[in-house]
Amino acid sequence: MSPLSSLGIASTAFNFFSALGTGASSKADAGRSDFAASLALRLAEQRTQSFDALFGAMAGKSAVDGLGSSLESLYDGLFGANGAFAAGSANGLSASGRNLSLFDPESAYRMMTDINGREVTYKAQFAELSEMKAAVGDMQRAGAALAAKMADGTAADDDPALAAELQSFVAAYNEWVGRFEDTVRGGGLLAGTQAAEISLYELRQSVENIFNGAMGGVRGMSDLGLSIDPATHRATLDVDRLNTVLANNRDGAVAAVAEFGQNFARSAELLVSENNFIPNRLDNLDRVIDYIADNRSSLQAEFGLGDPARPSALVAKALAAYERMQMI
């Protein structure tokens, strides 16, 4: 495709929006909506801020009513009633990387700068979320192991052994929270990422579920002394309280721990199962990363080179992890 052929920019923009909005499954809507929708909205905003200036058109079309209308407005801005390209023929890029044939080369250049930065950010997010997926798998195994120890009698009849198993689980859980709690907060790599936020929330809710052990007269793990601090989200185990319940209702306590381990493992498994939050987010990230890579030349030819990305130290570290993943 020639850089500014009559359908060049419209075609590239349409494909870019389509790639951002494509998901692996209709079931993925909840997991990818914050991702694809925010990207589509961001570039739709770029359309209103940059494309209007680029082509000096679209009078009276200031509102963005959705993807279809924004693309229609973009097309109207690019082409007149007779289909003639509004900005003229392509003359290539200047020495500074701008497309001087456009009405406003600087706005187009800023758009490409934004795309360059987002590509790096998405790669960093892919690496971070991949680590989270692996960690959720570790938590699934921790829950399953706890349930297994209750079922095979390894710890069920020995108070210190049962307490040790719960302490081991608490340590694993706190390591999980310590690794990923900050990454979903403001400034973190996965801030605002629904898949990551839900993963932390769901596993916390699983620990706090008051119905574990209900059939045996136990109201959740908090009755056994295992609780979550509401401020730090770290788990603690009150061994004295555990021993008291074991002395008065051993069968109920052991059943509660077994049920908790099973349910916790099931919650973790769902988070990383096919067509669920983390896999769908990773799939969407992968699609957009591939799209930008496959279409970089045409995007740059039409909008300019843009400034290279300047990742923060945090992003650069995750980006290095992403590059190592691609070498495996």
Image (tube, rainbow, N blue to C red):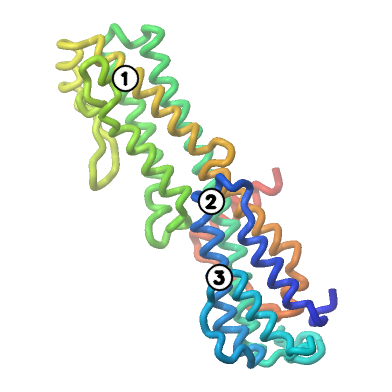
Q: Which label is found at residue 257?
A: 1
Q: Amino acid at mark 1?
A: Val
Residue ID for mark 2? 29
Asked whether, in this view, residue 215 is left or right of residue 27, the answer is left
Q: Position of residue 98 (x, y in %)?
A: 70, 86
- Cβ–Cβ under 8 Å for marks 1 and 2: no
Q: Amino acid at mark 2?
A: Asp
At 39% from the left and 26% from the top, the residue drawn is: 263
Q: Nearer the N terminus, badge 3 or badge 2?
A: 2
At 37% from the left and 9% from the top, the residue drawn is: 154
Q: Position of residue 143 (x, y in %)?
A: 41, 25
Instruction: Classify residue 309 by image quadrant.
Output: bottom right
- Distance, label 3 to label 2, CA atoms, is 17 Å
Mark 1, residues whose alpha carbon is within 10 Å: few (<14), some, or many (≥20)? many
Q: Which label is found at residue 66?
A: 3
Q: Amino acid at mark 3?
A: Gly
Q: Which element type, helix, strand or loop, lies under badge 1?
A: helix
Q: Position of residue 267 (x, y in %)?
A: 43, 32
Q: Nearer the N terminus, badge 3 or badge 1?
A: 3
Q: Which element type, helix, strand or loop, lies under badge 2?
A: helix
User: 99 or 60: which is nearer to us?
Assistant: 60
Mark 2, residues whose alpha carbon is within 10 Å: few (<14), some, or many (≥20)? many
